[in-house]
Amino acid sequence: MKISVLGGGPGGLYFSILMKKANPGAEITVFERNRPNDTFGWGVVFSDKTLGNFAQADPETHAEIERNFRHWDDIDIFFRGTKITSGGHGFCGIARVKLLAILQARAESLGVKQQFQHEVADPEDLMREADLVVAADGLNSLTRKTFGEAFQPDIDMRRCRFIWLGTKKLLDAFTFSFKETEWGWFNLHAYRFDEHTSTFIVETPEEVWQKAGIEKMEAEESIALCERLFADVLDGHKLMSNARHLRGSAMWIKFPRVLCRKWHHRNIVLIGDAAHTAHFSIGSGTKLAMEDAIALAGTLTREPRVEHALELYQAEREVEALRLQSAARNRMEWFENVDRYVHMDPVQFSYTLLTGSQRIGHENLKLRDPEYVGLIEGWMAQKSGLAGRADVPAPPPMFTPFRLRGLELKNRVVMSPMAMYSCKDGLPDDFYLVHLGARAVGGAGLVFTEMTCVAPDARISPGCAGMWKAAHLRAWKRIVEFVHANSSAKIGLQLGHAGPKGSTQLGWEDADEPLREGNWPLVAASPIAYGPDNQVPRQMTRKDMDRVREQFVRATRMGIEAGFDMLELHCAHGYLLSSFICPLTNQRTDEYGGTLENRMRYALEVFKAIRGAWPQDRPISVRISAHDWAPGGNTPDDAVAIARMLKGAGADMVDVSSGQTTREAKPVYGRMYQTPFSDRIRNEAGIATIAVGNIFEADHVNSIIAAGRADLCAIARAHLTDPYWTLHAAAQQGFNQIEWPKQYLAGKAQLERNLARAAQMALVA
C-alpha cells in the first residue's frame, strides 16, 4: 500500500508511525514544506487522559514524550489583584519543536520516508500516485481549499486577536491573568513547557485591539505592550517571538473555527486542523490531530477497503470532535466576552472560567480539588445569607436559599412548567393535586403550574389548564393550600395564551396538529399559520388586544386569591405574546410590528397590566424564547435586549427557553444547551434568570448556580420520572440538612445508609 501524508506536523507524523507499525510493508512518505526543526508555536499541552491514549497506541513514542515533558496540576487565576489556585487538573507540556523531533525520529526508525522543504502545489498529484493521501496540512489546509465543494467546510472567523509568544519566566502552573486597560480587557494564557521556557498567549477582542492602536504598531512595540500589561507575571523577564518574519500587526491573528461536513473525498482524507479546529483555550488542537491519527490508522488496519475505512474513521471521530469543539466553543466565547463576567467576585469569576466549557462540572472539580470547591461553596453560602458555622459545612450551591422581592426559596431547584393535557374545560382535578403536590413534597424550592390559559380560546388543547372562572380558582386554591400545608415549597402560576398554536391535539396524540373536530378560532400578531395544516389565525385588532390584556389581568387577580407565591408570564414558544415578539410570525405594519421595540410593545402592555394587579412583594418572571434557531428570527443578542426591556418594565426574572416559535427552527441540542442564553441575559442585562433545557443532573444545577449562569434551574422531564428528584440529589451528595416529610424519614435513613454502603463497596472494588 502506498500512502502519502501531506503535512509533517504531529498529526501527520503520528499517523505515519502508527500505520507503519500496523503495516510494515506499506510505503509511507511524509511531505513537509518546512525544515525539520522549523516551528511556529511554542509549547503543546496534553492532559493525563490523552497521554494514556498515547501509551496504548505507541508505548515507545509515549515513553519519549514522558521523558521530555513538564507536568503540573495547578491552574492559577489572577483577577483584580487576587490570585486563586485550583489543583488536580493533570497537564503536561512539551516544546512543539521537541515533540516534532521525537515523532520524526520514531518515524524514521520505522522506515517512514520524510521529505522536508517539499511544497505540494496540487494534492491531486499525490492522489494519482498513491493508494491513500492523508491531508494533515493544518489550519490553512490547501487540500480543504482545493476540494472545498467535496469537504463543505464551515469556517467562522472569531472576534479576538491573539499573539503567541514565549518567555524564560518559568511558571509553576497553567496561568490565566486578566488586565483592564483604558481600551478594554486583555487576557493571558500561559504555561511552562520545558526546563527553560513558557508559552505566553495574549488575547483581546478586535475592538480593544484597535482602540489600543496595535494594528499600527511594529512587532517590537506590540510585544513591549504585552510586557507592560503583564509585568507582574513576567517578573522582569522579556517576551520572545519566533514569528518575527511577520511584520507589525500580522503577528496578531484571529482564530478560525473550522468544521468540515465531510472529511474524505475519493482516496484523500483530512485529519487534525484541516478537518476541525479547537480553540487554544481548551488546549486540544494537537490532541485532536493525534487522536484522529490513532482512529484513522485503526480503521485502515481493520478494513482493507480504503473508501469504507475512511467512512468508518469519520463516523468514529466525528462525534468526539463535535463534542470537543462544542466545549471549545463555549470556552472560546467565554474569553471573547470576559467583560460579561468582570463584575463578579474573584472567587466566582475563577469558577465560571474553570467550568466555562461545560465539560467540567462541580463534582469533577471536587474530585480534583476539594479545598477549592470548599472555597466556592463557602462563598455561595455567605452570599446567600447563610450564617457560617465551623461545625456545619456549607451546602452544595443548589441548596442555598434564594430571595426575590418578598419571596424566599429554600433551594435553587424549580419544577419546570410542563403541560399535562389532563383538564376538562380548564379545570385541574385530583391528578394535578397529586402531580404538583408530589413535586413540592419531593423537595423542589419552587413548583410551577403548566401554562394556565386565560380564556377558553387561549388553550393549546382541550386538555389544558385554565384560570377564567370561579371553579378554576377554587381548584387551584385547593392545590396551593396543599402545597403550603405539606411542604416548604413555593408554588408559581404560569399564565399564557396559545395564540396561533391553539386548538391542537393532546401532547401524546399528534402534537401541534389541529383537532380532528371542534376547532375554535385563533388570533395572533399576524395571519400566519404555525404549520401547513394549522388554521390561519386572525390578526389581532386593538379591540382584541384590549380584551386579551384584561383576560390576563382577571387571571392574575384570581391567582392572588388562590394564594400563588409567584407569577410567570409566558412569552415564548410561538404562543400569542411570542407571536408578536418573533419577527418570523409578526408581519404587522402598525406600531406593533417592525423593530424589536415595536414587536415587544404588546407583551410589555400585558406585563405592565399584570404587574399593576399583582402584589408588589411577590415577584413576576417572564419566559422567553432567547433564540428562534431559524434564519431571520430572534438571536441571543435580541434576547439580551428583550430582557432589558422586561427589566425596565418591572420584571424580576427571565425564564430562559428557546425555539418552538417556527417549524423552521433547527436547534442544536445537548446537555444544558440553553444555559449559555441564560448566562448572557443574567450577566449582560443584569436580571435574575432561570436556566432550563436538558438540565437533569444535580451536578448541572450546582455548576450553573455556582458559576452565576442562572439563579434557579428548572428541571423538567427528570421531574416526570422522579417526583423526589431534589431529595434524592441531596442524599446522593451527602447533604442531610434538607427537609423531608416526617412521614418519610425512615425512607431517608434507609436511602442514606444504602448510598453510604454503595460508596464503600466502590472504594473496595
Image (cartoon, grey):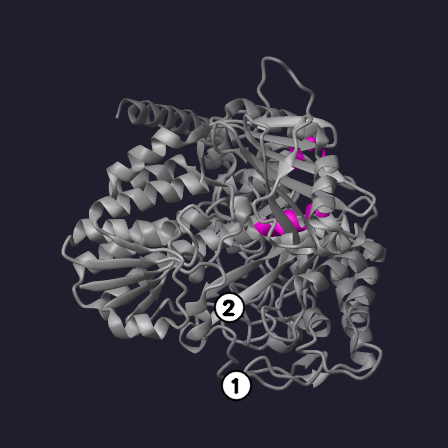
Can you say whether 356 is above or below 295 in the image? above
Residue nearest the viewer, comparing 690 with 534: 690
Indicate the quadrant where residue 417 lies: bottom right
Residue 732 % position (x, y)? 44, 32
Task: Say whether residue 762 is magenta.
Answer: no
Residue 290 % position (x, y)? 36, 49
SS at mark 2 in the image: strand
Q: Which residues are magenta?
A: 332-349
Q: Quadrant of the C terminus?
A: top left
Q: Is residue 233 toward the left or the right of residue 210 in the image? A: left
The residue depicted at 71 percent of the width and 56 percent of the height is 206
Can you say whether 393 is above or below 646 in the image? above
SS at mark 1 in the image: loop
Please state which amino acid type lies under the numbered disc 2. Asp
Label 2 crowding class (10 Å Cα cut-off): few <14, some 14-19, many 20+? Answer: some
Label 1 crowding class (10 Å Cα cut-off): few <14, some 14-19, many 20+? Answer: few
Q: Quadrant of the N terminus?
A: bottom left
Task: Say whether residue 333 is magenta.
Answer: yes
Residue 44 % position (x, y)? 46, 41
Residue nearest the viewer, comparing 322 with 599: 322
Residue 166 % position (x, y)? 58, 38
For disc 2, the marked residue is 154
Please state which amino acid type lies under the numbered disc 1. Asp
For disc 1, the marked residue is 533
- In the rendering, which numbered label is found on residue 576? none
